[in-house]
Structures are given as structure tokens and as C-alpha cells.
Image (tube, helix red, strand yellow):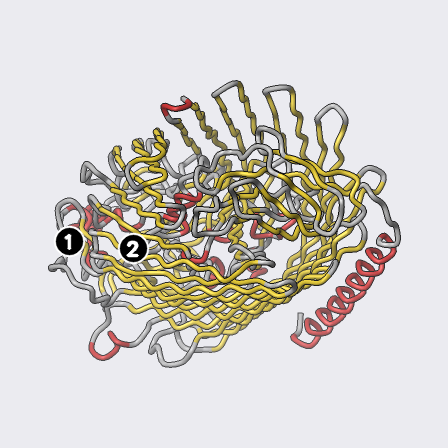
Amino acid sequence: MSKESAKSAMLNKSRSIVVIIVILISFSTLLGQNKNCDFFVEGTVYDLNTGEPLPYATVTIKDTQKGTVADEQGYFLIKNLCEEEFDLVISHVGYKTLIHHHDAYHEKPDIYLAAESEYLKGVTVEGQKNVGAYQTQTVEIVDKSVIENSVGTTLGKISSSLPGVSMISTGTNIAKPMIHGLYGNRILILNNGVRHAFQNWGKDHAPEIDLSVVDKITVVKGASSVRYGSEAMGGVILIESDQPELHEKLKGEVTLKGETNGKGYGGELSLSSGGHRLAANISGNYYRRGDMNSPDYNLTNSGMEEIGGKAMIRYHKERFDVNGIVSYVDQKAGIVKGSVVGNLEDLQNAMENEPPEGTTDFSYDINTPRQEGNHLLTKIQASQNFSDNLITGFYSYQLNKRKEFDIRRGTNNDIPSIDLELNTHQVEVNLMHEKIIGLEGNVGMQWIYQDNNNLEGTNTTPFVPNYQNTSFGFYMTESKSFENNSMFEFGLRYDYSFLSVLGRDFNQNIFSGDLELNNFSLNVGYQKDIENFSIKINAGTAWRPPNVAELYSFGKHQTSVITYGLLRYTLDENFFPVTENVLDPADKNIGAEKAYTFNTSLRYAIKNWKIDLNLFANYITDYIYEKPAGITETVRGAFPIYIYSRTDAIIPGINGRANVDFGNFGYSSIRFDYTYGQNLDDGSAFIDIPPFRLNFSYNKEIDDVWIFNKITSSIELEHVFRQNNAPRTITPQEFIDAENNNTDIFNGDFSIFDFKDAPKAYTLLNFDVLATIKSQFFIRFSVENIMNTDYRIYTDRIRYYADEPGVNFKASVNYRF
């Protein structure tokens, strides 16, 4: 397809998008003509200090005679309301009165009232109402205490506290979430409703997320492509910040935090205020950490530094909301120096010997190899209520900049080897409609345009070419509830994707290429509640187009690896990659990766027990993965070679959790995760499938101890087994011997192999305690890896060269005013 015809096709499709938007608005306006008085509001009132339900609070609708009194469990329900939005007034003897603005399109609010003796005011917690979208899928929410204790950590590590979620990483600073064995472009990250756009390729690119401004992390496990698009094949991670609250006097928080391993330190500040129609909040964060230490040696060049900020504003009038957000984060992350070597013998020594080559004493300096990235997100969103319908639309712009510095000779050491700038525009319109023939749900559209460019001055051949990517999708998700406590859900989506690249090959000749794909996605689900038992069954199809790195990556990337994309190599008679030419997508019949997914979630709750079990299976055709292909020596050193390859794959598994409440004696939790992955073409195992793990935790709360209103403590024991479902191993020494003896190391076996055996099993012990003073001061102390265990994580690429960090003491002080 020529550039002119492609642009013409995109113009026609853009016109179609406008027509769809007009139809949606017209449809919602027509539906909004009806007026009824069947709205209601329900929620629960709690004591802010103790977190316990507050019985017999008075809840009224402001400026009306309608209201009720909460029951002994703090629950309230007000029916037969004629307006879909209103101000709730919540009061109780001995507590400060709270006013909360509520509408029918948010979930039932949790109201926390502050005692008159407390300095703080009450707060309200609520989420967007969810109909016709992932209700039959397994949804997990990261515990608030885990987010608050995220001192110097990553989104990948925080998310891995949930069953079925792990991480793939390159050292302590660079990690991305993995859900049911899938990661990268198969996991969608939504940052305050916006698809987080970054260089989401490779194992050493983490999302630039400032966790200090995150208040809630929700993980939807299983394919969610119908609602969110092609990158949601394995699941979705929803990152949310608290929205500015109306009717709220100026309040804020100051947090100081630090850790011993790496001598990290930093702080956060946030302010918020709200009037009758206008509300806003603002926050900022800074954190710095030097080299971390394993139990036996310093992890040289493992430091990090981060600075970020966020501002949000909200304007509201009856049935109409406008929200705006601007966030920025700048991150610098070092990679362990010992991961870069000079020749084959050094590579073998680096994988066998400790400490890593180049290990020095502690330093805050972040030298090469390192990454520098910053991310700007802006979003403007408007929503309009029409009777029992809500139409929402937003536009967002993101600017992502990434520089990667390798160990290079001479003055090139100070010049980035990769310097990328990604601009992303996104438009989304969604209509949440009232019941039509018993169905309620969402219909909408999404449009995304990306422009990614290599900036000049790297003195290298670009690792990936410049590209432009345009995609749009139309979707509908509907659900129907039945009187027997069951619900049926289904969804359908159409997506179109067009990728156009322009780059230079090894000889600096210009090449170009286009890839146009489209596909339908389908999802069906069923939920049934029977007394103490509930079951969710969900099945569907999902797809995604190959990303630019899977197609066109060429050359050395960080952590001493050379990578070739599908269109940058052919294989010779010895199955070694030949990289002289750039291929056309038609040469390798490049198409979409397609998945057929099945998830079943079971829950049993009785008295003080709650048991959750999740079984899943992903069958994926044309599954794209990185495959070791050998070792080569260049002027920059000896490096393992990886090539992107395709196969059919099956990735099933099971995970679960059991919680038991001992009343005054605390509560405990046991969870487990097992994932299995197999290459169906040759029966071999994939490298990056997480091993089986078990986790036990015990939590205890004590009220009124000395000056503390509450002390909450927890202890956690986690055991990670050795990955026995690992591919065969061919070490660098075996490559050296084969070269010296002029023998064929593969001997006709071209199945997946690894350069080093899977690491041994390990056990970690962690501790955390939080003390509260008048709901105003929060003092936290925690210890990670109490036993100072030496261990390596199977899904961490640094495992080839170094151990993970040893014992780490963390502390933070939070003051709210």
C-alpha cells in the first residue's frame, strides 16, 4: 500500500469515527428524555480511626427530607430518588459531619467519619460503576498498605503481591508486571484511564509510573481485549489516583521515607481542596538510592533516582463533569556493571563466578550501563449524564523520552546508544447506557496515534526504526442479571492497526515497511452466586499486532544481549542468524498473534474463611518470543544472541488464596501460583515462565497502645521453588569448546535452550508494622529479606550475573493535615 492510499484510507476511517461519535451522542440524548424516580444510593459508614463499621449514622440528601439511619453494620440505603446526582450529608454524635457529592454512575461509597477530637476530616472512597465490563473475570486489588510501603520499588514488584501476578525484570530498578505468564505488549496498563504509552518492548523497559501518586491498583486477570483493545490479551492493570473531592477544605500529606540497602531517601507532598463546583489536588515526589548490596557483595551501579509530580482539577455542575490531569516523572536507573563483559571467556566467568566483574564500593553514582527516561501525561475528560445513561469522552497526549547508555569506548561512553522520543495521542468515547431489553453495558470507540523517532547523535545504527502507528477500535460490552443470583456477560470488538516504519540497515541504507492488520475479539462470561459459593466462567478470543521491536530490532541492547527482530534475519544451514537484509512482512507472512483464553474463578466463604481459586488456560497461535540463538564476539565484547521467533503456545495454570479471620487474634492468608508454558511446535519449555511459589502471611491489629490509636503488624514467609519446567542449558563454555573442536553444538536439535540453569529454590521472610497516632501521624517500619538470603529470580535477566539484594530496613513517616 502506498503512503498516499494509506493516508486516504485513514481519512475515510477517521470520518467513520466522527459519524459513530455523533450517533452515540444522539442515542444517549434520546435515551435521556425519560424521567423516573427509581434511583438509589447505598453505602457503608466507618470510623476513620479504627476502620470499623460505625452504626446508626444519619444519612440524608441535602436540601430534601429524604434520608435514613445506618444499621448496626454501618450500612445504609435510600431508595426512590428522582435525581441521579446529589449531595449526601453524613453525621453522627461525636463525629464531624461530612458532605459527599454522589451520582448513580459510581459504586456504593465507603464513608469514613472522623471523631470530633481528631484533627482530620472524614473521607469518602468510591469507584466508577462497572456494568458490562469484566464482571465475570477475576479481579484483584493491591492492598493499600502495599502501595503505601512502596519505598523505592516498582509497579512490577507491587503487582506481584497478588495471586497469578509476577514480574519480569532486569535488576532491582527495571521490572514490568506479568499476568498468567504473559507480559509486555500482552498486558495493558491504564494510568488514570489512559493507555500508558512507553517503549513497551524488551524485558528491560519498565513503565515510567510514579507510584507516589497512585492510590489504587486493580488487576483484571485474563483477556480484556474487548473493552480495552489488543494489548489486553493477558490482562489489565488499572492505576488510579484519588479524584479531587468537592466540598473539601484544604488538606494535605507530607511523607519522609528511607531504606538501609542502597541508603535510599526521599519524600512526598500532596495538597487538595474543593469547593461547590471546583476542586483540585497537586502532589510531588523525589527519591534517590545508591548501590544496593547482595548478602555477599555490592551490586555496583544499581542505584536509581526519581522525581515526579501530578496535578488534577475537576469542575462539576449538575449532570456534567470536566476533569483534567497533568503528570510527569523523570527516572534514572543503573544496571549492574558486571552484566557487561569483553569476550567469551569473560562471559563464562561472569556467569560462574562471584562477585561480578567490576564490583566496587558503595556509591550514589549511576554510570553506564544505565537508562534515563521521562514521561509526560496530559488528559482532559468530560462526562454528561442523561437520565440513566452516562457518556464520557477524553483526549490525552503523552510524551515519552528514553535514553540508554552502554559501556562504550572513548567519548561515546557519555553518548546514549539509544535515544527515542514517543508522542502518543488518544481519543476515547464511551456510552454507559440504561437497560435495554434487560441488557446494560457500554458501547464506544478508541483512537490512538503514535509517532516514535530516533534522535540524532547516538553514533550507532538505530536499534528500532522510526515508526508511526495508527489504531482504532469499536466495542460493545453487555450484561444481563437474572433473579436467581446469576449474570451473563458478552462483548464484541473490532480493531484496526496500521504500522509504517522508516529506518536504516547495517550499511546505513534507508528501508521502509508497512503492516496493516485488523481483527475481531469476542468475550462471553457467566457468574452464579449460591449462598456461600460463587463461580465465574469467562472465555474469549484476543489478538495483538507484533510490536516494532519484535519485527525490526537490530543489534546490542542493554544487559549484554544482541537481539534481531523477525524481519532482520534469516537462518543459515546451521540455524545461525544472517542479518544482511531487511525483509518485507510478506516474506515471513507476518500476521497477528491470536489467543483463545479460558478463566474460571471459584470463591467459597463461610464464617471466618474465604477461599479463592482461579484456573486459566491461554492457547496462542503465532506466539512471538525471544529465543537464544548462540553467542558472538564483536568489537564491543562477547554477547548472547537472541532472535524473535514464532510458534504456537499453550500457557495454563492455577492460583489461589485462602484467608482466615481469627477475630481478636488477627488474620492470615495463604496463596499459591503455578504457571506452565510449552512450545507446541517442539515440546520445549519457554524461558520466562515464573516458577511455583507459596506465600503465607499473618496480620494482627492492636488498638490503643501507649500514644498509638492502632498498631498493625504483619509477617510474610514466601517460598519460591526451582523452575523444573525449564529448557535445556548450553553454557558459554560449551560454545567455546564447540568452536575449538569445530563441532556442531546443536547437532540437529534447534529447540529452545538457556545459557544457564534455573536458579535454586529460596525462602524469604519479611516484616511490616504500621503505627497510627490520632489518624494524623502514620509511622511505618519494615524489613525485607530478614534472613539475608542469597537468591536469584528466574525471570530476572540479571540472574545470569548477580544475586538479588540482601536484608533491607525501610522506614517512613506520614503526616496528614
Per the model, the C-alpha gap separating discs 2 and 1 is: 22 Å
Say what secondary structure mark 2 lies in: strand
Residue 414 position within the rendered picture, expressed as x and y whole percent measured from the top left: 26, 76
Q: Dividing the picture into quarters, in which one does residue 143 lie? A: top left
Q: Amino acid at mark 1?
A: Asn
Q: Which mark is residue 298?
A: 1
Say what secondary structure mark 1 lies in: strand
At label 1, counting other C-alpha atoms closer than 10 Å, the crowd grade (few under 14, some 14-19, many 20 or more) is: many
Q: Nearest to the eye among marks 2 and 1: give it.
A: 2
Q: Dividing the picture into quarters, in which one does residue 707 lie? A: top left
Residue 624 position within the rendered picture, expressed as x and y whole percent measured from the top left: 49, 49
Side of 166 relative to 55 (left or right): left
Frontmost residue, 814 versus 64: 64
Frontmost residue, 718 versus 384: 384
Residue at the image point whose x is 35% and y is 48% from the top: 778
Q: Is residue 121 visible?
A: yes
Frontmost residue, 424 versus 811: 811
Residue 487 position within the rendered picture, expressed as x and y whole percent measured from the top left: 71, 31
Side of 408 relative to 72 (left or right): left
Q: Amino acid at mark 2?
A: Lys
Residue hosting label 2: 257
At label 2, counting other C-alpha atoms closer than 10 Å, the crowd grade (few under 14, some 14-19, many 20 or more) is: many
Q: Is residue 750 visible?
A: no
Q: Which mark is residue 97?
A: none
Q: How many marks?
A: 2
Residue 341 position within the rendered picture, expressed as x and y whole percent measured from the top left: 20, 59
Residue at the image point whose x is 79% and y is 40% from the top: 80
Q: Dividing the picture into quarters, in which one does residue 160 lie? A: top left
Callouts 2 and 1 close, C-beta under 8 Å: no
